[in-house]
Amino acid sequence: MAGLLSCWQNRPIWTSSADIHVPVPADSLWDLVIDLDSLPLVIPSVVNFERAKVEGLRDDDQGKCQLGTRFHETRMIRGRRSIILTKIVTSLDDSNPDRRHLSFGISFSNSMQGKTYNVENTSTLTVLPINEDSSSQLILTISAASGGLNGLCSDVFCRPCKQRMINDSMEEEINGYRREAIRRQEKAAKRVN
């Protein structure tokens, strides 16, 4: 039985992607994506954001988005309950301006009805230029996995609910990036005029 349970731990449950056209240059959109402190502006359900100090980094480098950057965000789910996510930057590649990406490992524990469900996700934001000077595409991909017997049972009985919640969250996130990127571009244009 232990072998059966271990094969269910940390296995990918599903992968979902969403993408959106953003009418700003890819460089501007990328700057927003790596500006982690802007997450509460981008994602309305984020009600608290807190960086964790990264061991071995100088104080000057603590605010930069880089491998190992860790933070906690608290989100309201459907306006009712909050969930605290711990995120760590696991991949950051901006070496190719035609395809840049930022990936997070995301973990949280959720206790419901006296049971604890540990969930591990990977979230990747990819920025692609569409027109060199005027627009870009943002792709958000989330791979989610649940561990243990509780995770297995919740996958069998609640997977459509969890999938809908993840999809709603993804839509909120990519639309938030689009909205904030446009707002920043309009603000910069007003400064020029």
Image (spheres, grey):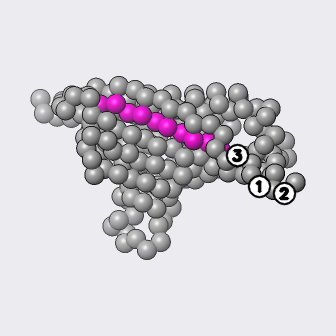
Q: CA distance from mark 2 to mark 1?
A: 6 Å
The magenta stretch is 136-145
Answer whether residue 140 is magenta in the image. Answer: yes
Kindly state the secondary structure of the residue where label 2 is placed: helix
Extreme residue toward the left, this view = 193
* Looking at the image, residue 165 lies above or below residue 67: above
The amino acid sitting under disc 2 is Ala
Front of the two marks 3 and 2? 2
Q: Amino acid at mark 3?
A: Ser
Query: Residue 77 in the image: x percent, y percent?
Result: 64, 34
Which mark is first along the chain, 1 or 3? 1
Residue under label 1: 6
Characterize the local packing of mark 1: few (<14), some (14-19) or many (20 or more) Cα atoms within 10 angstroms.
few
- Considering only vertical position in the picture, is 135 above or below 76? above
Label 2 close to label 1 by CB (< 8 Å): yes
Q: Residue at x 34, y 30 (%)?
A: 137
Q: Is residue 62 visible?
A: yes
**Relative to the observer, which residue lies in front, 135 or 14?**
14
Give the x, y percent position of residue 147: 73, 50
Query: Residue at coordinates 27% horizontally, 40% vertically from top-left?
Result: 98
Residue 131 occupies quadrant: top left
- The location of residue 57, given as percent across then percent down, is 40, 71
Q: What is the secondary structure assignment of the residue under circle 1?
A: helix
Mark 1: amino acid: Ser
Please name the residue that numbered disc 3 is placed on. Answer: 146
